[in-house]
Image (cartoon, helix red, strand yellow):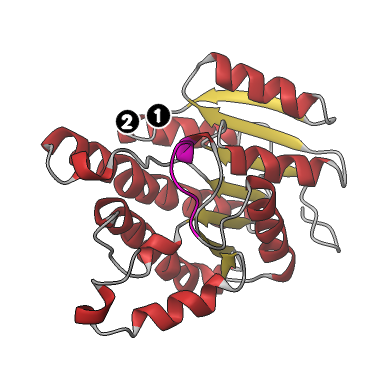
Amino acid sequence: MIDAVGNPQSLLLLGGTSEIALATAERYAGRRRLRVVLAARPSPRLDDAAVRLEGVGATVMTLPFDAADTASHPETIEKAFTDGDIDVTLVAFGLLGDQEKAWTDHATAVELAQVNYVGAVSVGVLLATALQRQGHGTLVALSSAAAERPRRSNFCYGSTKAGLDAFYTGLTEALRPSGVKVSVIRPGFVRTKMTAGLKPAPLSVTPEQVAEVIVDAVTHGREQSWAPAPLRYVMSALRHVPRPIFRRLPI
């Protein structure tokens, strides 16, 4: 169970090699003893992630997980809960990809949608069931500021995150009577390996800063949070800019 000051005993990371997910686990592990389930494709990166968290005192179990293989998701989620309740589940997987290729190449576009949206919905349904069954828990979904208004530069990615965002926002209301909580986190540009080589946008953040936002959202039961916080007001303003003006903005 999550203690009185918001610290969980157990954490499930779907996308267990995500830099944001690992930074979140490290923050929690620094507060109390933590059991972590890392779910990701088997690879040296997954092995390194387990060693990294064990180095900060966490007890770690790894599970094979492929976001695009939705048929395998029920078994993966069932195994994640085998050793006991999970206090916080974090949906942290996703693809960014080549945005020009994403709207001109069929396979690339389908893969992006399959992982970022279909995969996220698949695990969301399964996690909602599992958390309701145990009677408590928080489900955290990593959305994106790109979900809030389509832009020419990344509309394929943004559309997949918009779908994810809408699903988990609705799930927040659907699960409210059960006591299970949902937090949708909307980072802006995050400086990670996935964005290496790209020009950082204004208000860019580190994985550790996003982890702070996640921990704060869980502790205080926030249903939506932006990383960094001022991004909320920037995106609110951009949503109301007329399209003829919006398309001329250097974003």
The quadrant holding residue 214 is bottom right
**Which residue does the numbered mark 1 point to in the structure image?**
66
Type of secondary structure dominating the magenta stretch: loop
Name the residue nearer the viewer: 251 or 240.
251
In magenta, the rendered stretch is 194-201
Q: Hey, what amino acid is under mark 2?
A: Asp
10 Å crowding of disc 2: few (<14), some (14-19), many (20+): few
Q: Residue at x 78, y 25 (%)?
A: 54
Establish if 23 lies above or below 5. above
* Percent of width and height locating residue 121: 36, 51
Q: Quadrant of the C terminus?
A: bottom left
Q: Amino acid at mark 1?
A: Asp
Check disc 2 and report the residue beneath it: 69
Q: Residue at x 40, y 29 (%)?
A: 66
Looking at the image, residue 242 sits to the left or right of residue 52; the answer is left
On whether residue 38 falls in the magenta region, the answer is no
Q: Give the quadrant of residue 177.
A: bottom right
Residue 6 sits in which quadrant? bottom right
In this view, 240 is above or below 48: below
Q: Measuring from the top left, give residue 69's x and y in whole percent.
A: 32, 30
Check whether the beta carbons of the residues at disc 2 and disc 1 lie within 8 A of each other. Answer: yes
